[in-house]
Image: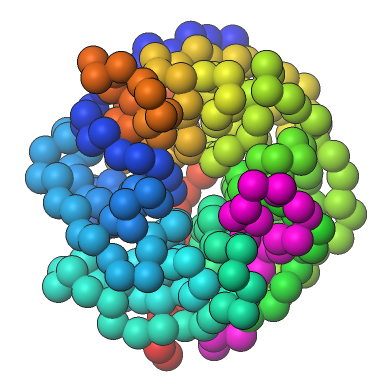
Amino acid sequence: MSFDLTFECLLEARCDVAESPVFDDRRNWLFFVDIGRSALHRMELSGAGHVAWTVEGGACSIGLAHSGRLVLAQRDRVVLFDPDIGAITGEIGAIEPDIADTRLNDGKVGPDGAFWVGTMHDAGDRRPVASLYRVSPDATVERKVEGVICSNGLAWSGDGSLLYHSDSRGPWIDRWQFDPATGALSGRGRLADLDEASGRPDGAAIDVEGNYWSAGVSAGVINRFSPEGRLVGTHRFPVPAPTMPCFAGPDLKTLLVTSLRPAGIGEESRSGGIFVARSPVAGVAIRRFDDRRL
């Protein structure tokens, strides 16, 4: 399907690094983080009701939980955050707390009910020392993929049989066979190799037709790939660095995209804001982490 997207700025947040937009279909809220300022944000889909919390320990990515709490990836641990009281209410597990130059990055709840989250090498030389982890509802932490520089781009097909995962510094996007009952991975394959000009792959989302929407953070675009890896669309973004798309709204056809604010950008720029467009195709339904035993 070929189509154009028209983006508008929904919230002029001026975040350092807005990331991890997650639509809460029960509350009709959008949650997202600002990694640069260790902040967690909430707003209505109209752009109203904006609230922000500064979180000690960092705010790198989030997922929804059955209880209404959020799974929050901090710099080196995964915790539960209650937006009704604006506080962390429990820790699930630590990840690489003994490695000073890595931190957690992109994370999402998978069709297996676990929170999947990767690390990134947070240093100038950018070495492949990071990994992708599975954090289960019983608080077990398993390393699933190694040899990554900057883990990113997590998304699952609608039936839960495929996992997509990227390395923003690879820069590549891979596709795995995924068992939604156990979280087992198999049959790794390359979906796409990218570069600065085509758009290093940042955060991502999946639509109901199986297309993978990747924020091309270095090129100011949203790239749309078929399940086989064919580039089926490139959508220009109104500011230089989109970071992650998210489908929202009752029909999951409201496309929300976070962005970062590059150093030296002009004061008039809306970079670091939240942008919205209407999509002709819906996104995959939201998944939730089972925190009932935590």
Task: Please tell me whether residue 145 is drawn above or below residue 137 in the rendered image.
Answer: above
* Residue 8, magenta (yes or no): no
Q: Which quarter of the rendered picture does the C terminus lie within? A: bottom left
Q: Position of residue 81 (x, y in %)?
A: 30, 72
Nearer to us in this view, 46 or 96: 96
* Residue 136, magenta (yes or no): yes
Left or right: residue 272 versus residue 218 is left
Residue stretch rendered in magenta on the structure? 118-140
Q: Which quarter of the rendered picture does the N terminus lie within? A: top right
Q: Position of residue 140 (x, y in %)?
A: 61, 85
Q: Residue at x 28, y 82 (%)?
A: 89
Nearer to us in this view, 270 or 124: 124
Task: Please tell me whether residue 189 is drawn above or below residue 65 in the rendered image.
Answer: above
Nearer to us in this view, 170 or 291: 170
Residue 159 in sight from this viewpoint:
no
Q: Position of residue 4 (x, y in %)?
A: 48, 9
Left or right: residue 53 versus residue 221 is left
Q: Residue at x 44, y 57 (%)?
A: 60
Residue at the extreme left of the image, as rendered: 49
Task: Please tell me whether residue 29 is drawn above or below residue 250 in the rendered image.
Answer: below
Nearer to us in this view, 291 or 285: 291
Q: Classify residue 80 by image quadrant.
A: bottom left
Q: Residue at x 11, y 38 (%)?
A: 48
Left or right: residue 114 versus residue 247 is right
Q: Classify residue 27 by image quadrant.
A: bottom left
Q: Position of residue 51 (x, y in %)?
A: 15, 51
Count the marks: how many? Answer: 0
Left or right: residue 89 versus residue 107 is left
